[in-house]
Structure formats: C-alpha cells, structure tokens
Amino acid sequence: MLDAKDKKSLYIGILLAILVLVQWSVGMFLAPVDAMQGQVYRIIFLHVPAAFTAFFSAFMLFIYSILALKSKKDSYQQMCKATAEVGLIFTAITLLTGSIWGRPTWGVWWTWDARLTTTLLLAILYAGYLLLYSSLEPGPGRTKACAILGILISADVPVIYQSVNWWRTLHQPQSMLRKGGATMDPLILWTVVAGILILILFSIWLIVQRKTNIALQDELETKSFQQIK
Amino acid sequence: MLKIRELTFGFRSRRLFEKISVELRPGELVHIAGPNGAGKSTFMSIIAGILAPQKGTIEFFPGAEAGTPVDDRRKYLEYLPAEANGMYTKMSAVENLKFWSNLRGRDVSGRVIFEALEVWGLNHPVIRDQLAIDKFSTGMKRRLALARLQLSGVPCWLLDEPIYGLDTKGLEAFHNILKSHLNAKGMCLVVSHDLKPLEGLPTQTLDLATGRISK
Amino acid sequence: MKTPNAFAQFRILLANGIKSELSDLERLISPLLFALTILILFAFAVGEVEPDMRIKLFVAEVFLTTFLALQISFSRVFEPARTDKVFDLLRTYPVSYNAWFLAKYVLVVMLGLSVALPTIFIGAIMNGKALANVSIWGIIPVTVLAVAGLSALGVLLAAITMKAQSRQILYPLLYFPMTAPVLLSAIQVSVTYLEKGIFNSDSKAWFLLLASFDVIYVTLGVLLFSELVDDSQ
C-alpha cells in the first residue's frame, strides 16, 4: 500500500511523464518539417533537452557536493549519488540521440564538436564518480571523497566545454549542430525550450525518487547488520 | 590533562563503544581492556585524531586540571599504531627519526638520535644510516618506532600494542622508558595484550565494553 | 618546544618528499622508460610523414606521451605514505594541511617536469627532420604551465582515490577527461609556435585558459585537501 507521500510523488511523476509525452507529440506531429533536414531533425526535441538536463545534473552535483561536504549529512550524499546516476542516463541519451541525428543528416555517427565532446567526457566522469562511490567503504571518508570529486568534476565542465569549443572553431566553421539562429520557426523554438524545462523537472523527480531509494537501501543495510548482531 | 567525555563510536554494522569517559592526569597510566574486536584500536585512533567520534568530546589541557583546552591536541600527543610503525620504508632509521622530530619542532642533533637508538640497540652505523627500513625485522622496526616515541618529548603517549615483536631486552627497555615518562609527569594510554611490561607501574584499567575504570 | 610554522613544515615535508622519491629510483625511472617506449612505438607505427604534418604529429605525440607517463607517476604519489601507515601518523602530528598539500604539490610539479622535459627533448631528437628550422625552447613555458595544472589535479585525485579498491582503473578514468583542456591548450599553443615561430592572439587565449585551470585547481587543492584528509572533526 502506498502512503500519502508516495502517492503524491507518484502523481507528480505521472504528471511530468505526461508533459514529456505531450512535448514530444507536439514535436513529432505538429512542428513543421525542416526545409533541409526533413523529418529527422525532430530528434532535437529529445536531444537538446537531454543535453541541458545532463548539464543541469552536473550543476546539481556541484551544489549537493558542497552541501555534503559542509554538513556531512547522509541525505546530501545520497542526493549526490542519485544526481550522478540520473546525469549518466541523460548524457547517454544525449550521445545516442546525437549519433542518431548525425548519421542521416551529415553522414557521420560522431563529430568532435564542443557539446558532444563535453557530453562524452562528462559521461565518463559520471561513470568514474559512481565507480569511486562503489569502491570505497561506506562512511564519512566516502562522503568526503565523493563530495570533493563531485565539486572537481562539475567545476571542470565549463573549462572542458570552452577548450573544446575554441579547439573546434579553430579548425572548422561554426558547429553544424547549432540549434539554429534567428531563423528558427517559433513553434520549434518554443517546443524545444518547453522540452528543456519539462525534462529538467522530470529529471529532478527521478533524482528524488532515486535518492529515496538509496536512503532506504542504506537504512536496510544498517538494520540488517544490527539484526545479525 | 587529557579529558575524554562520553565518547561513542560505531560502524554501520555495529556499535563499538558508547559514552566512554576517562581523565588522564600527569603521571597516570591507563590500560584499555576488552576482548578482540571491542574497538580498542579504533578508540586509540579517535583520540589520536585519525577518526572522528560520533558523539563525545576530547580535550587536552596544559596543566593537571581543566582550564582552557589547547587548540590542537596533536602537539601534545604521540601515537604508536598497532601493526604498523609509520616509517618511510625506503629511507634509513636516522632519516626517519630526523624527519619526525623536525616535524615536531625538535631540531635534534645526531648525538641525541644516536643516544635514543642506543637504548634500543639500533645504534650500529650500518643499521642506522645505510639500511632502508624495509630491511629491518619486525622487532627492529618496532624498536625504532619506540625510539621515535622517546624523542618526541610530548606529555601524552597513545600506545597500541607497543611491545609487539619485542624480545626480552626490548620489553625491559620499554618498561624503563615508560617508568621515566610517568615519573616526569607524562601520561600514557595503552592497549596491550601482555601486561608484564606494566608491572610495578600505577595502572588504571578502562573496560571499553562497560566504561568502568578500576585501579 | 614550539611546533614549526606552516612554512617551516612545508620545507620539512618537501625535503622529506624529495628524499623519499630519490631513495626509490624505480619510481623516477619507470615513467621515463614508459615515455621512451611510447615515443618509439609512435615513431614505429606512424613511419614517414608528409612535411606539413610533421610538427603537428611531433607535438601531439610528445604531449600525449607526457600525459600518459604522468598519469602513472601521479597516481602513485601517495604510495610511500600508504605503506606502514605513514599517512595516518602524519595526521596525528600537528601538521598544517596547507603546508602538506603545497609540499606535495611542489614535489609533484618537480616530478612532472622531470618526466615532461626529457620526453620533449627525446621526442625532438627523434623528430629531428620536423624541427630542423625551429627552436623547441618556446614550448617549455607552456609545458611548465601544463605540468603545474596537471600536478594540482593529480595530487587531489590521488588523495581522493587513495583508499579505493579499483584505483588502477579509476585514476585514469577520472584523470584523462578532466585534463583534456590542458592537453588541448598545450598542443594548440605549441603547434602555433612551432609552425609560425611566434605566439598569436589565439595562443593568448589558450595561455589564459591554461592559467585559469592552474589557478582553479591549485586553489581547490588548498581548500579541499584539508577537508579530505582531516577526519578528526
């Protein structure tokens, strides 16, 4: 049986999932066909929000890592781990959709543009973070090490982005994967913007769910040890 | 004086000790007793500053009575871990002793170091200058750590299984330096399975499981 | 008896660190041997190169090799202190954590340069044809800046992963993505200098990026090392 709090969060989750589906549907069916790319461009309605969400997770990791370091409370540490997991999922989605978009549009599965490259490096860093988390004994030592790594990773993301951006602009004209500029159809633009906001909210919901999950797991572990004693 | 109040610590899996309080005054020796796994070494690491307690406080006061606690008790403590000696294994005995003494602000001359090494039978020029620590035997390493203890010049000693690996002569030397330390108003917390070296010294025993102190 | 101040402790710890590294020469020589092997492998695998690609290849090869060799060096920086619980004992001494970090940092910069500079010179010799008309001295400043940044991050990462069981794979997994900006900057600036003989406005931007990276990570290092190591609070 679900208690009141779980029910509330379930309803919020369902609402957000519906919003995501609505946004995709608008993108799939209502937005106009692109003159150059045809139907395949529609993947940006998932790709761009996923990219923003992946980076937003890095920002959340930064904030919660600082909180975990300052207050040493378990709940902040659990939020950090949840953020890294959800961040990894969204970086994976970004990379996958980027590939799917790139292949029919420009004939390549991959390109070293600033955003994709930074997303790839961020995915590797999230994986490293989770690997560190699982390689350390639970306790204040792990909280501190992971919190500090979280700060380092998220502080590095803008630096990585800027360096790759400069590197690419030196070698080839403006990235092909720009959202477009002033010439973008307003419906497309707003659908993408809405998608970014909705997906970020959805990711926050996922992070909170996952954090609750991790907290319960920790509690279960502690209690089961105590039972054995 | 070392004042420990209501010290509590446990891992996720189990509680080790709860609300342990003890006061250690100049000239006093407290032996920490308990079965294997009771948390004696963990208790020592917390006092030494390696781990944080979950509850409770540790304060060090410069005199024999409580007053204003010092800001950094590490200046007044020397810790000897169990099963390790804290030596740079690729460096020599003299280099190690010099380093640790300098870190405390004791700019010890060669002569003082040699005297300490002499007490522990390590004063041979080859042993002290040319042999890397990883070539030492277990007993030799322990004796070197005890030489460092002697050179530290701090009032409070935290010793975890100090006589591990020592032979009869080593045990005797340990008993002697402990006695001099206590006579000079030093204090000592010790964990030791073998109580022989503490014989004849005014010892109190702290039972970690109950928190009770007996004379 | 007065505990030495932070600067005195810095000197003591640095001197000891240098002694400790020199007392175990394998730790110094193996990264260099590794770098040499990689350089040889590169030369072997790539073979003859068109003249206009030679400089780019030299720079990429030399900096990549340096990165790989430094990764090995850096991941091991706390190993002497890990044996025999030296690290724990240091924490029971009245040591200033800032002095400790800075001493470690300076030691690691020295180690890093002792690997990076020979690698550049050996690479230059092996790529003699490419560098016939240029002086490689111009790439020394960017190398120093690069090592300065890598060392700060290297020490922090080594401290973070010190107790992790999967350290061998974890360290490079974190180190390479995070140091990508340094690698890019060093390569871009060096290629520009070697091809054109001067630093241009783009180079200035790269230098600035490198300098920011260095400042960010040394600052974070000083701030976070004590949080990481001090378990007593």
Image (cartoon, coloured by chain):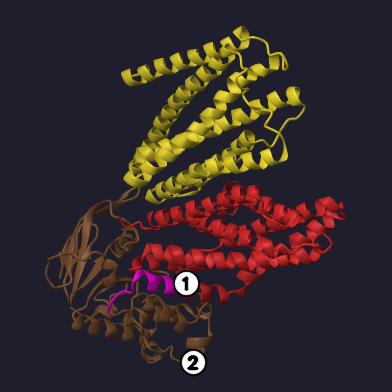
Chain colours: A yellow, B brown, C red
Residue C137 shown left or right of residue C110 in the figure: right
- Depth check: B195 or B135 in front? B135
Spatial separation of the CA atoms under disc 2 and disc 1:
26 Å
The residue positioned 55% from the left and 64% from the top of the image is: C109
Residue C61 in sight in this render = no
Q: Report if residue C52 lies within the magenta region.
A: no
- Lateral position of residue B125 relative to residue A113, left or right: left
The quadrant holding residue C34 is: bottom right
Q: Secondary structure at mark 1?
A: helix
**Considering depth in this image, is C23 or A217 the residue closer to the camera?**
C23
Badge 2: residue crowd in 10 Å (few <14, some 14–19, many ≥20): few
Q: Position of residue B137 (x, y in %)?
A: 49, 80
The residue mark sitting in front, 2 or 1, is 1
> Which amino acid type is shown beneath numbered disc 1?
Leu
x 70%, y 63%: residue: C35
- Residue A22 point in image, percent of width and height: 53, 11
In the displayed structure, does residue C191 sit left or right of residue B129? Answer: right
Mark 2 belongs to which amino acid? Pro
Residue at numbered disc 2: B125
Task: Tell me, yes or no, if residue C70 can be seen here.
Answer: yes
The answer to which of C171 and C151 lies nearer the viewer is C151
Q: Position of residue A159 (x, y in %)?
A: 55, 44
Point out the stretch of residues depicted in magenta.
C1-12
A54 lies above or below C164: above
Element type at mark 2: helix
Read off the residue under disc 1.
C14
Residue that appears at 26% across and 65% down = B72
How far across and how far down the image is residue C100, in percent?
42, 65
| Callout 1 crowding tier (Cα within 10 Å): few <14, some 14–19, many ≥20 | many
